[in-house]
């Protein structure tokens, strides 16, 4: 069976704190595109629907999550003091904050996308595995996560953390 690719656009904001002198330490945004590539469990064979699953079944939940939860979210590291600001002053906006262990880089986002989409596919027992996540952060910068570059089991993300859950969550803020 053929591999599938799905593309979605979203707007986001983040800030990176590892280098306090970087201009990335101030909240700022990007209009990004994510392209996910899915490899089928089985090779193509003629017969019946000639597809392992309808496209809508494979991409529907993924695109709903991107559109309704990732789009316009603020991406922060889990220990960013801005989270306390929202908790104390604007708790109604906490659901729009996406959290990461460490800086919310595009690499970290690609890894979280990989885990979330994998959780969706597994939850719906769809016969596909994620084989690549490509994020175009700007028209000139892209991050490409491949199976060689990403070990989903050994990446250090907690087993119960939001990227591993097949729900619509984007953080673990209580
Ligand atoms: Zn940025």
Image (tube, rainbow, N blue to C red):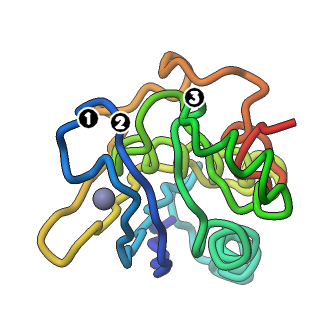
Q: Which mark is residue 160?
A: none
Task: Name the residue that disc number 2 marks.
Answer: 17
Q: Residues within 10 Å of mark 2 (few under 14, many from 20)?
A: some
Residue 14, above or below 149: below
Task: Name the residue that disc number 1 marks.
Answer: 20
Element marked by disc 3: loop
Q: Position of residue 161 (x, y in %)?
A: 73, 31
Camera-side residue: 26 or 36? 26
Residue 14, above or below 88: below
Residue 140, above or below 111: below
Camera-side residue: 110 or 56? 110
In space, the residues marked 1 and 3 are separated at their CA atoms by: 14 Å
Residue 165, above or below 149: below
Callout count? 3
In space, the residues marked 2 and 1 are separated at their CA atoms by: 6 Å
Q: Is residue 164 left or right of residue 102?
A: right
- Residue at image x 57%, y 36%? 81
Picture quarter with ligand 1 = bottom left
Q: Position of residue 66 (x, y in %)?
A: 63, 71
Q: Position of residue 21 (x, y in %)?
A: 18, 39
CB of mark 2 near ligand 1 (< 8 Å): no
Label 1 near label 2: C-beta < 8 Å?
Answer: yes
Q: Which mark is residue 79?
A: 3
Q: Position of residue 88 (x, y in %)?
A: 80, 46
Q: Residues within 10 Å of mark 3 (few under 14, many from 20)?
A: some
Q: Is residue 3 left or right of residue 126?
A: left
Q: Nearer the viewer, mark 1 or mark 3?
A: 1
| Mark toward the start of the polypeptide (2 vs 3) | 2
Q: Residues within 10 Å of mark 1 (few under 14, many from 20)?
A: few
In space, the residues marked 2 and 3 are separated at their CA atoms by: 10 Å
Element marked by disc 2: loop
- Residue at image x 59%, y 24%? 157
């Amino acid at each position: 069976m053929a591999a599938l690719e799905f593309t979605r656009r979203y707007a986001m904001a983040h800030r990176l704190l590892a280098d306090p002198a970087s201009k990335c330490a101030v909240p700022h945004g990007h209009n990004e595109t994510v392209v996910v590539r899915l490899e089928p469990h089985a090779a193509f064979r003629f017969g019946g629907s000639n597809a392992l699953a309808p496209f809508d079944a494979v991409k529907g939940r993924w695109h709903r999550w991107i559109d309704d939860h990732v789009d316009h979210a603020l991406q922060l590291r889990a220990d960013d003091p801005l989270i306390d600001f929202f908790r104390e002053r604007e708790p109604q906006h906490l659901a729009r904050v996406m959290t990461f262990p460490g800086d919310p880089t595009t690499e970290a986002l690609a890894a979280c996308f990989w885990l979330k989409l994998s959780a969706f596919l597994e939850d719906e027992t769809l016969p596909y595995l994620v084989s690549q996540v490509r994020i175009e952060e700007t028209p000139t910068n892209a991050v490409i996560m491949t199976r060689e570059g990403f070990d989903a089991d050994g990446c250090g993300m907690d087993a119960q953390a939001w990227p591993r859950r097949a729900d619509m969550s984007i953080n673990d803020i209580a």
